[in-house]
Image (tube, rainbow, N blue to C red):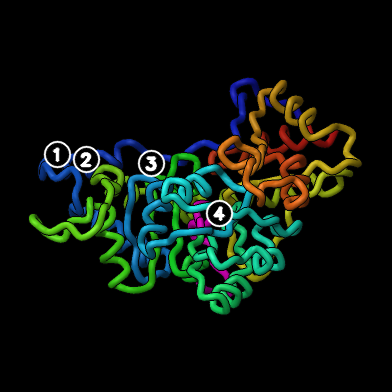
Amino acid sequence: MTERKEELPIYVTRPELPPLEEFIPYLQQIWDSKWLTNNGPYHQQFEQALCEYLGVKHVALFTSGTVALITALQTFRITGEVITTPYSFVATAHSLLWNGIKPVFVDIDPRTLNLDPDKIEAAITPHTTAIMPVHCYGHPCDVDRIERIADNYGLKVIYDAAHAFGVRLRDDSVLNHGDLSVLSFHATKVFNTFEGGAIVCHDAKTKQRIDHLKNFGFVDEVTVVAPGINGKMSEINAAFGLLQLKGIDAALEKRKAIDARYRELLAGVKGIRCLPISIERVANYAYFPILVRPDYPLSRDALYQKLSDNAVYARRYFYPLISDFPMYRGMPSAAHENLPVARRISAEVICLPIYPAMSMEQVHYVSGLIAV
């Protein structure tokens, strides 16, 4: 199918934005009140709205998912070693280094691309204090097995749930698993507030500590109880988030349709593998990764270049592995022989464009480039 010129280029994602005129009344209210930040009315309304939409008890808003990850580790005073995945965006492991914690990388499951529970237990040492799994591409981790391991060894579980907005597992929010879950509302995510993030927790006492940590540790005007940071979400971001919630269900339905069409068009392409769909979960279709196997006519990088040459800007998420970057590759757990599955997947993966405004003609165009 020939692509119309005006529909190129096609990027890996584009943010879903409401009509600008719908945002103006929110801005007017902020201008009138002069309350720009520091737990304002939109901040409070947005936290409550997220609790209701996501089906969780407590949400603490942040300026970014990365600041939220850093703060989540401080919430439980995590030290020593934390077991995590090499197959993620670098912020996952960077949050550990920012806290003086040693990341311990373990391999991933070849089917889900999440932390392999069979590898976690062998990596636990007397210095291990927590596990930080990632719900990669929004696909839930094996939360039950991870919980059992954590309980057996007295470890905290902090999920990097940056990809998992709205994901449900067995009719419950996946964010209700673990001790904490951390969301990202970055512009590239399924749900965005321009920049932003959040920590999901299960009790009011933990929420209070998180709120102290994200506001310099202040309890009141003269009392500071922790070396906190300025991690508060502004009123503008919170107001935008409230508006975005009105359109999120429609956006997810559009993503679902694009995901289904990709699967239909790529089903018979030899050497291309799409990740399986789990009947246990409600997905958010945040990404559409394919694996370029050895029996495909082109290498992964050659296909990536072919797409780029034809104005399709896919991404190799996640390549290189986090463990290959200079600040990590000297660690024993980063050794090549310890991460064979993650290394293979990283060499095969391409995430194809997917976003609500993407037309089915564009989906056919992208798929056609892969199929020939």
Quadrant containing the C terminus in the rendered view: top right
Could you tell me if the residues under marks 4 and 3 are in contact, i.e. CB atoms within 8 Å?
no
The numbered disc on residue 195 is 3
The image quadrant where one finds the N terminus is top right
Residue at mark 1: 31
Please tell me the numbered disc located at residue 55: none
- 191 and 62: which one is in front? 62
Q: Is residue 318 left or right of residue 164?
A: right
Q: Which residues are magenta?
A: 160-172
Label 1 CA crowd tier, 10 Å (few <14, some 14–19, many 20+): few
Amino acid of disc 1: Trp
Look at mark 4 in the image and give the residue it sits on: 253
Q: Which SS class for mark 2? A: helix
The three-letter amino acid code for the residue at tag 2 is Leu
Residue drawn where x is 22% and y is 43% of the image? 25
Q: What amino acid does circle 3 point to?
A: Glu
Decide which of 71, 49 is in the foreground and name it.
71
Between label 2 and label 4, give the one nearer the viewer. Answer: 2
Question: Please, what secondary structure does the residue beneath circle 4 have?
Answer: helix
8 vs 189: above or below: above
- Horizontal side of residue 161 vs 302, given as left or right: left
Dot 2 corresponds to which residue? 27
Q: CA distance from mark 4 to mark 3?
A: 23 Å
Q: State the CA–CA distance, disc 4 to disc 1.
A: 34 Å
Contact? badges 2 and 1 (CB < 8 Å)? yes
